[in-house]
Amino acid sequence: MNYAVIDLGSNSIRMTVFAHDDGKTRKILNIKETVGLAGYVSKGVLGKDGVQRACDVVDSFRRTAAEFVDPANIRLFATASLRNVKNREEASLIIAEKTGLSPDILEGEEEAALGFAGVVPYLPADSGILIDIGGASTELVQFEDRKPVHLTSLPFGSLSLSVEFVSETLPRSGEMNKLKAGIQKRLARVEWAKGLKCPEMVGIGGTARAALKLSRAQFGLPPELKQVDAVKVKKLAKLVEGMEDEFLQTVHRVVPERLHTITPGITLLWQAMKAFDVETLTVCKFGVRDGYLSSRVLK
């Protein structure tokens, strides 16, 4: 049987169509559209244009999914895109009315738990830290013996940091200093993380995947490699901070849709790796949609 899971995020909307037969699951379609919903938020309210943009893309995905999936098996969930706005109920009702799909709004710890559930079978180590940097939130999970110990959702991500700290597409020198200081201050508020050292970090989500793609392009890593050491991520953070013409061309070539969020995203990733004394980042292609399917749809 086929299922479609649509993820209404703050930076992009993604859909995965899964085939589940005889207890085995495989992906038969992955699509996304960058929408930047966090950029439509003013004074905590998601504007009408942002709600309409969400409706248009979700409805388009719904029609695509209907080619593969019984309409009853199409599910929609929302993360910080609706969780963090004051008009979440009103926006949800409009989306449901215009698309026929009612968003399941995940709370922060739910999102973290589902992200972890999606990657458990593929963890490279029994203990470590999972990070999922989204457009308007960042989820952290400390795990031991392949089980979550602490789950935290922080109300900022690559796009919301860009909106808050960056006046143009790329941050100026003074803005970069404020960005780094702001990230460090917010990470320091995570009580359970103080003094914690985790050599292994697992990254899921668009920022982690972008970091891997840029590392492959910049450092000549083989395409099948899923791991990047801390030294290379530090160099990557320096490159996105300086953003000289040659590296800017690499960004345009490799992750053009992330030009306006790549500096905040990679900076946040590196600051988190420093905070936990991480030695190796492993990027996993599985995540929240996989966890949602296994934990909310199939059970």
Image (tube, rainbow, N blue to C red):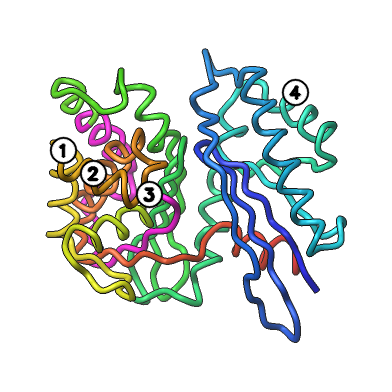
Q: Which residue is mark 2?
A: 249
Q: Which residue is mark 1?
A: 245
Mark 1 is on which residue type? Asp
Mark 4 is on which residue type? Glu
292 or 2: which is nearer to us? Answer: 2
Q: Nearer the viewer, mark 3 or mark 4?
A: 3
Does residue 119 appear to the left or right of 99 in the view shown? left
Task: Give residue 256's quadrant in the image.
Answer: top left
Mark 3 is on which residue type? Thr
141 or 51: which is nearer to us? Answer: 51
Q: Which residue is mark 3?
A: 207
What's the mark number on residue 90? 4
Q: Nearer the viewer, mark 1 or mark 3?
A: 1
Task: Give residue 199's quadrant in the image.
Answer: bottom left
As helix, strand or loop, the secondary structure at mark 4 comes to helix
Instruction: Indicate whether 235 appears above or below 227.
Output: above
Say whether disc 3 or disc 4 marks the residue closer to the N-terminus.
Answer: 4
- What x and y, as percent, mark residue 194? 25, 48
As helix, strand or loop, the secondary structure at mark 2 comes to helix
Q: Is residue 187 magenta?
A: yes
Instruction: Indicate whether 102 appears above or below 127.
Output: above
Question: Residue at 67% across / 39% down in the picture?
Answer: 57
Quadrant where the N terminus sits is bottom right
Question: Residue at 18% across / 45% down in the picture?
Answer: 247
